[in-house]
Amino acid sequence: MGRKAVVTAGTGGIGLETALGLAEAGFAVTVVGRNAERGARAVERINARGGEGARFLQADLSSLDEVRALASVIGGEGEVDVLVNNVGAMFAERVEIGGVEGSFVVNHLSPYLLAELLLPVLADRVVNVTSGSIVTAKKVFDAVEPPGGYYGFHWYGRAKLANLAYTLDLAQRLEGSGVKVFAADPGGAATDMTDGTLLSPKIVSPGLRVLWPLVRRTFEKSTSGPAAVAARSSIVAAVGDLPSGTVVGRHAVPVKPARAAADPRVQLAVRRLSERYAPLQRVADGVSN
Ligand SMILES: NC(=O)c1ccc[n+]([C@@H]2O[C@H](COP(=O)([O-])OP(=O)(O)OC[C@H]3O[C@@H](n4cnc5c(N)ncnc54)[C@H](OP(=O)(O)O)[C@@H]3O)[C@@H](O)[C@H]2O)c1
């Protein structure tokens, strides 16, 4: 039987290009997204590119209940070779999802929960999609949100840092199990996510706002490329012969992980937050999400 891959947020942007690449590499790919029409179009494109048996599953991955439902459907079908946790989001204005700050939910808790719930059926590897924005993140994880004002770009980066710390932690946890764990940084691309979200100086801290014209030009330049190029790092992480725990950087080659993500104290703090805000089993009186 052919190898099976799941790509979250795989019906557009970098996720669709990742799914196309995996289909070309011989995987039967499941793409996950919210919009069924978009999903159908993605499946058509993947199968036209030589993919076999691509399919769409509908789930809003900003809802942890929908993540659980998705995991239960996929997990009930037997082994999955590769899970690419590609979903991500940046919010210019602060949002809450089930009482938890939104960027932490979509960029960390959701991929964390999906990976944990699918571990029993994972045959080969998990790829978590990271971002260069982690360099701007506050590295304290006592709580879901650091103190102080909300700045969308930094909060996005901090959630991605949490997810990278989790990725490295998980790689250690699964050592010797046969399941490998990778992070992939796409660099940047012109996608729905970057379209319009990087235009307001409000997304960065006051310190960076002083340099806004320069910062904005940097954002524009780094997110102007095609999603197909950005997807290469995820594809390399998904099919490459690399040691578990490797971070595949924006040029699709291994890079050194950010120091904060490899810090055991950060990993422990992230683990505690993850277990608290995305419990593997839904309990009636537990934290709502
Ligand atoms: N673009 C960049 O410059 C850049 C740079 C660094 C890292 N990244 C990371 O790369 C990954 C992909 O980025 P992208 O720019 O391709 O994102 P994107 O433009 O938001 O991706 C669009 C895809 O995501 C799906 N999607 C969005 N929200 C979803 C949700 N809540 N649940 C399920 N599906 C959802 C969309 O389908 P529906 O609308 O039908 O749901 C569509 O398939 C993210 O993790 C992002 O953080 C991106």
Image (cartoon, grey):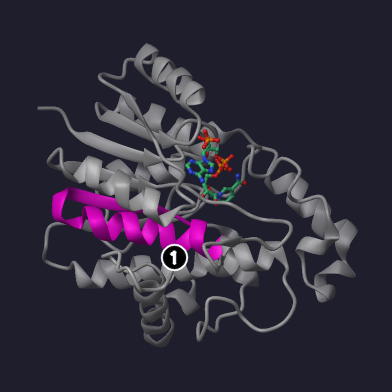
Residue type highlighted by circle 1: Asn
Range of magenta residues: 103-130
Quarter of the image for residue 238 reads top left
Q: In the rendered structure, does residue 50 fall within the stretch colored magenta? A: no
Residue at x 51%, y 24% (from the top left corner):
38
Residue at x 20%, y 56% (from the top left corner):
119
In the displayed structure, would residue 39 be above or below residue 243?
above
In the image, residue 182 lies at what x, y percent?
33, 57
Q: Which residue is mark 1?
A: 163
In the image, residue 285 lies at what x, y percent?
35, 73
Check mark 1 vs ligand 1: CB closer than 8 Å? yes or no.
Answer: no
In the displayed structure, would residue 127 be above or below residue 225?
below
Residue at x 37%, y 67% (from the top left corner):
278
Tell which of 85 and 239 is nearer to you: 85
Quadrant occupied by the N terminus: top left
Near mark 1 (Cα within 10 A), the count class, few <14, some 14-19 or many ≥20, is: many
In the image, residue 86 lies at what x, y percent?
44, 47
Q: Is residue 173 left or right of residue 150?
A: left
Q: Is residue 102 left or right of residue 60?
A: right
Tell which of 122 and 172 is nearer to you: 122
Q: Is residue 252 left or right of residue 178?
A: right
Mark yes or no: residue 243 visible: no
Mark yes or no: residue 277 visible: yes
| Helix, strand or loop status at disc 1 | helix
Residue at x 41%, y 56% (from the top left corner):
64
Quarter of the image for residue 164 reads bottom left
From the image, give the main secondary structure of the stretch colored magenta: helix
Numbered label tally = 1
